[in-house]
Image (spheres, rainbow, N blue to C red):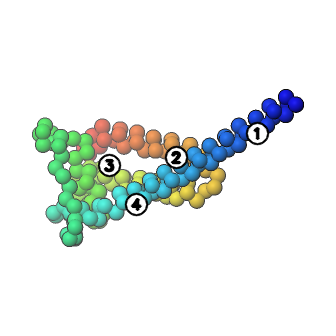
Amino acid sequence: MAKRVLRMGGNINLSKGINMYLEIKNEYRFVNIILAFLIVICLLVPFFIYIPGITRYNFKYSLQPLDSFYTKNTGRECCSTGLTRSIVSLYNGRLNNALSSNRIGVWIPFILFFQLIFRFILLTNKNSNILAWCDIFQIIGFGIVIKISLLTNFNA
């Protein structure tokens, strides 16, 4: 009789573990949907930023980039100076201007596009256990690459 009780208790713990796994999987799916939505917004925003001399169109509700707080207060350029100008130049087909403003700005839309494709793969794949670990490592990897690029004055 004691063996049956232990066995039933083990089954109950197993079902709790499965339920917790399914909850985590649903939460991960929800986070991927939110991230995909934010990435789409980030990919679309440069179309609505107006920079005189670079942007071809001035929309009724266009945004203008803010002045750099760091540059205003120190008088020196920071490592991300020209990043918005670089991305907007790339979106307007001016690659030379994009590269001269800040080189990392050319890579950011491609990284975001890769992220969007990766989110789509994660959302459509039913067995995403290994992909979840790949997701963690690729986010950390892209973060390190961008940080190193910005710190080593990539716009030189």
Mark 2 neighbour density, 10 Å: few (under 14) some (14–19) many (20 or more): some
Give how far apart the Cα atoms at labels 2 and 1 are.
Answer: 32 Å
- Relative to residue 13, is residue 88 drawn left or right? left
Of badges 3 and 2, nearer the viewer stands: 2
Mark 1 neighbour density, 10 Å: few (under 14) some (14–19) many (20 or more): few
Residue type beneath disc 4: Val
- Mark number displayed over residue 11: 1
The secondary structure type at the circle numbered 3 is: helix
- Relative to residue 2, is residue 153 drawn left or right? left
Residue type beneath disc 3: Ile
The answer to which of 139 and 98 lies nearer the viewer is: 139
Residue with the most extreme front position: 1
The secondary structure type at the circle numbered 4 is: helix
Q: Position of residue 96 (x, y in %)?
A: 26, 58
Residue at the spot 88% in from the left edge and 31% down from the top edge: 1
In the picture of the structure, the residue carrying the numbered disc 4 is: 40
Residue 10 quadrant: top right
Instruction: Please tell me which of labels 1 and 3 falls first in the chain.
Output: 1
Of badges 1 and 3, nearer the viewer stands: 1
In the picture of the structure, the residue carrying the numbered disc 2 is: 135
Give how far apart the Cα atoms at labels 2 and 4 are.
Answer: 18 Å
Give how far apart the Cα atoms at labels 4 and 3 are.
Answer: 19 Å
- Mark number displayed over residue 104: 3
Mark 3 neighbour density, 10 Å: few (under 14) some (14–19) many (20 or more): many
Query: Is the C terminus in the top left, top right, bottom left or bottom right quadrant?
Result: top left
